[in-house]
Image: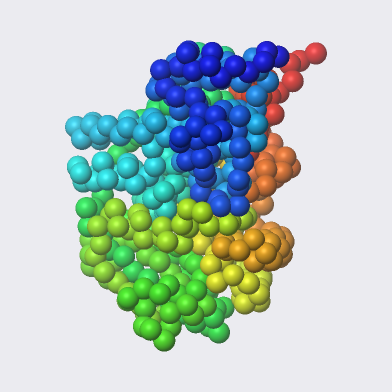
Amino acid sequence: MNPFDVETLRRSLDGAALTPGDPGYDEGRAVWNGLIDRHPAVIVQPSGPRDVATALATARNSGLEVAVRGGGHNVGGAAVADGGLTIDLSSLDQVVVDPGTRTARVGGGARWRQVDTATQGHGLATVGGTVSDTGVGGLTLGGGFGWLTNQYGLTCDNLLSAEVVLPSGDVLRASDTENTDLFWALRGGGGNFGVVTEFEFRLHPVGPVVQVGLFFWEEDRGAEALRHMQGIVESLPRKAGAIIAALNAPPADFVPEEHRFRPGYALLLGGFGPEPEFAEVAQQVRAGLAPLFEFTTPMPYVALQQMLDETALPGVLAYEKALYLDRFSEPVITAVTERLPLRNSPMSFLPNMFAGGAFTEVADDATAFGGARKPVVLFSIGAFATDADLLARDRQWARDLWDAVAPHSSGTGGYVNFMTDYEDDRVRASFGAAKYARLARIKAHYDPENLLHRNPNIKPALAPA
């Protein structure tokens, strides 16, 4: 191990190296979850792949723990480590759209609002997150559910290639024709194998105006509402997306004043096909169980992508757990409706995304993504608060609810992008034995020292004796 010399590092970079006290240091270590307050020894803001390679070499030679900051939206704060070296990719946030080939090249530090804005300028989009502040890198490498998943699959299903800086310092491109083992691993295996400085995505015609609906039922009708919503999403048209949520009604203009902040259940619909098709689904929702209130409207696609931003504002204190459900079965409905009233923070909520259609048409072994390719509900429990004591109580509430629902899950572990605690057994279960073993062999080839371990970590496979 060599002593760390920041001036030597700075002279070797075209970008910047920030240490405590430098302008921009606090911004560079800030992440979305306000619960995380860590102080890296140095933050490298690279100008390109060569700087990333230099940062990795410095960390390896100096014994510094490496963290990679894309959008900084990971709940567990994987992007920063006390006393470590953070590679802050926010300086690599360019988005270049080729409308002729319907592709986009996106820097590893870009956020989804940048991608949506650039692609919608050409009436195009790819599958992005449901909060526009989310980083492109983390979402893509872990899988990537979004409003367009029913129509176009996961974000990682739309990845065409990636520029990757390996822990060795080598820079290569991974695709269906180059470094195919690495490309397979990047699509769902997380940031275990290298630092991605550029993504190339397939784009699709979307918008620019889409249909949006929100239907809300009060807490007392929770069981009826969940059964009804499950039936709706099971017959959802391909050109539609749905989120089943348990939350407090927002203080928005479209919510009748007497129902603002009221706890209950909501179905959020996005329609990307013909307006009459969406209107028919909305009528099915009303006819099956009359909502307490509703709101339907045409909306720019970029506005839909930002609609949930206020549920996850930067700086909120957060904890999250998630798993996969085949559906909202009766035991799950009972667990949810009995425990939702036990929340302590009005900000805590359950956003549950339905995935069917194109998501199910990708072979299970086509990518490293750990969930089974069958219709699923991504069941997520978000404990959010502005007060640490309140969060501590709702962290326990989230764990208790998760424990009650887990026996009725689809048994595939969980979604790695929504993990706060990277328990080794949960990571293994999320990928399954066969995929984990394949990922471990790929990890051993590209990162045998496990330099990149601040993630849902894949341990390098041991060499045969």
Q: Give 175 or 12, whichever is nearer the viewer.
A: 12
Residue 386 visible within the image: yes
When asked about the image quadrant of residue 304, the answer is: bottom left
Image location (x, y in percent) of residue 348: 56, 66
Residue at the spot 74% in from the left edge and 20% down from the top edge: 462
Residue name at image x 74 percent, y 16 percent = 463
Is residue 2 toward the left or the right of residue 217 in the image?
right
Residue depicted at x 37% and y 44%: 112
Quarter of the image for residue 212 reads bottom left
Q: Is residue 271 left or right of residue 289?
A: left
The answer to whether 64 appears left or right of 70 in the picture is right
Residue in front for this viewpoint, 434 or 45: 45
Q: Residue 405 placed where, x, y %?
A: 67, 63
Residue under the point 40% across and 75% down: 251
Compared with residue 51, is residue 389 higher up or lower down, i.e. above or below?
below
How is colour applied across the structure in the image? rainbow
Quick check: can you spot residue 374?
Answer: no
In this view, which residue lies farthest toward the front? 21
Q: Is residue 248 above or below residue 455?
A: below
- Count of numbered marks: 0
Image coordinates for residue 324, horizontal then vertical, percent: 59, 54
Image coords of residue 166 (percent x, y): 53, 19
**Residue located farthest toward the right when viewing the structure as drawn:** 465
Is 219 or 202 nearer to us in this picture? 219
